[in-house]
Amino acid sequence: MNYDTLAVLAGLPEDPHGAVGLPIYAVAAYGFKTLEEGAERFASGEGYVYARQKDPTTRALEERLKALEEALDAVALATGQAATFAALLALLRPGDEVVAAKGLFGQTIGLFNQVLAPWGVRVRYVDPAPEAVREALTERTRLVFVEIVANPALLVPDLEALATLAEERGVALVVDNTFGAAGALAKPLRWGAHAVVQSLTKWASGHGSVLGGAALSRETELWGRFPQFLEPDLKGQVPWEALGPRCFPERVRTLGLSLAGMALSPFNAYLLFQGLETVALRVRRMSETALRLAEALRGHPKVKALRYPWLPDDPAYPHARKYLAAGGGIFTLDLGSLEAASRFLRTIRLLKAPNVGDARTLLVHPWTTTHSRLKEEARLEAGVTPGLVRVSVGLEDAGDLEALFREALAAV
Ligand SMILES: *Cc1c(COP(=O)(O)O)cnc(C)c1O
C-alpha cells in the first residue's frame, strides 16, 4: 500500500468498543490474573507489563512508523535525542569508533563529544562522501552516522553508496532521518541504511506541540557481527540466535526504555500518531511553497546565496532527486553579513524560533543560536555563515509568504 493509505490506516488497533482512532492508555502498569500469566508475560516479552517499556498507545505509533518507513520494527522514545542516544548505546562499546558526517545537528555532536567520548568512544568527523568515509574507517569502526538532509548545510549524502560501503566493511550505516519526515520525504532503510533515528518533534508532530523520537531498523545479517549480540544475556540467551535482526530494536527497548527510562508519554504518542496522518500532505504543500519562494528569491539583489535542494543548479540536487520525494520545507538565505541578517530578522513579520517542521513558518539565525556553541571555524565548516538565515516553511499561503519576504528584504 502507498504512504498516504498507510499514514491513516497502519497501526490502528482493534478496539473492543469499535473506537475509530487511537485510545490513550493513561496507565502505568498492566495486571495479570494468575502467577502463571505474569510469569509468561515476563518471560516472553509479549503483551504489556509496565509502561516504561511498552504501552498500547505507543505501540500503535511504533506500528505506524514501521509501516511508513518500511522497517522491521520501530521503537518510540521521549525525544529525537533519546532515540539517537539509545541506538548508539545499543551499538557501541568503549574502544569502538564512529565515522560521523561533519555538520551534524548540534546536540548530536554534543552527544558524541560530551557523552560518548568520555566513555571511550572515538568519533571522526568527515565529509560524508563515500571515499572520505572509506578512508576514515578502521578495524574499530562500528558505525557510520549521517543525516539526511544535513542542516543547515542542506546536503544530501549518497545513501546507496554509503550503505554498500558499510555492508562491505561490516559496519552499520545509521541515518538521522528527521528531515525525511517519517518517510514522507526519505526512506533510508530502503537504500540500505541498517538503522534510522529521528525526531518526531518536527514534521511528524507538525504543530510544534510535542517532543518525540524513534529508532527503526531493517532486516539484516549485520548484527550477527556485533559482539553485544553474540554474548549470552542475563537469561543465558544469545540475542542474535534468539531474535535474529530483532535483536537491535529489542536492545534499544531494553537499554533506552526499560533501563534508561527515556519513555514517550502515551499522550504524546497519541498526538504523534495523529500527526502522521497528515505529514505527507503537509510536506507536499511545504515543498511546493519552499520551491516557489526559492525560485522567487534567489535572484533578489539582497540575497547573496540561496540554497534549496530542489533547484537544479544546487549542489544537493542530484542526490535530492534520487533520495527525496520532494524538496522539503527548508531553504537557506545568505544575506552576506551579520548586520544584514539582523535587520532582515528584525523586519520580517514571521516567527523566529529554533525549530523546524511546524505548521508556521519559522526562521532562525544559526550563527548566533543553534550553532553558537561551536568555534567559528566549525560553524563555517557546517555551512553556517554570519549572514545565513534558515527558513522552515509552514502552511501559510505562498503568496503571503513571498510578499513578507520581499518586504523584509527591501529593508536590508
Ligand atoms: C531536532 C532534531 C533532533 C533532536 O530531536 P528532539 O526531538 O528535539 O530531541 C535530532 N536530529 C535532527 C536532525 C533534528 O532536527
Image: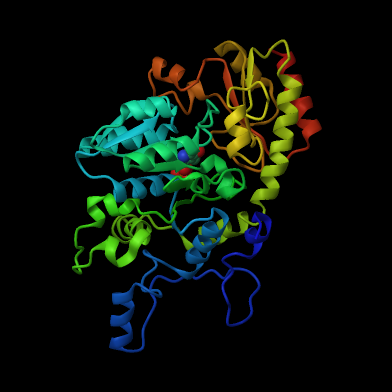
Type of colouring: rainbow
Identity of the residue furthest to the front in this view: 168
Q: Residue at x 33, y 26 (%)?
A: 135
Determine whether, in the image, residue 123 is placed left or right of residue 385.
left
Q: Residue at x 59, y 11 (%)?
A: 336
Give the total number of marks visible in the rendering: 0
Q: On the picture, is 322 further left or further right than 105?
A: right
Q: Position of residue 42 (x, y in %)?
A: 30, 75
For image coordinates 35% across by 58% down, the residue present is 257
Residue 238 picture location, percent across and down: 23, 63
Residue 268 percent across, percent down from the top left: 52, 57
* Quadrant into which the C terminus falls: top right
| Nearer to me, 248 or 39 | 248
In the rendered image, residue 33, in percent from the top left (x then y), is placed at: 36, 88
- Judge left or right: residue 248 versus residue 154: left
Q: Quadrant of the N terminus?
A: bottom right
Q: Residue furthest right?
A: 399
| Residue 185: quarter of image | top right
Identify the residue at image location x=32%, y=75%.
Answer: 44
Residue 199 versus residue 287: which sits nearer the camera? 287
The front one of 241 and 8 is 241
In the rendered view, would you say 60 is above or below 371? below
Residue 95, image quadrant: top left
- Residue 324 drawn above or below residue 372: below
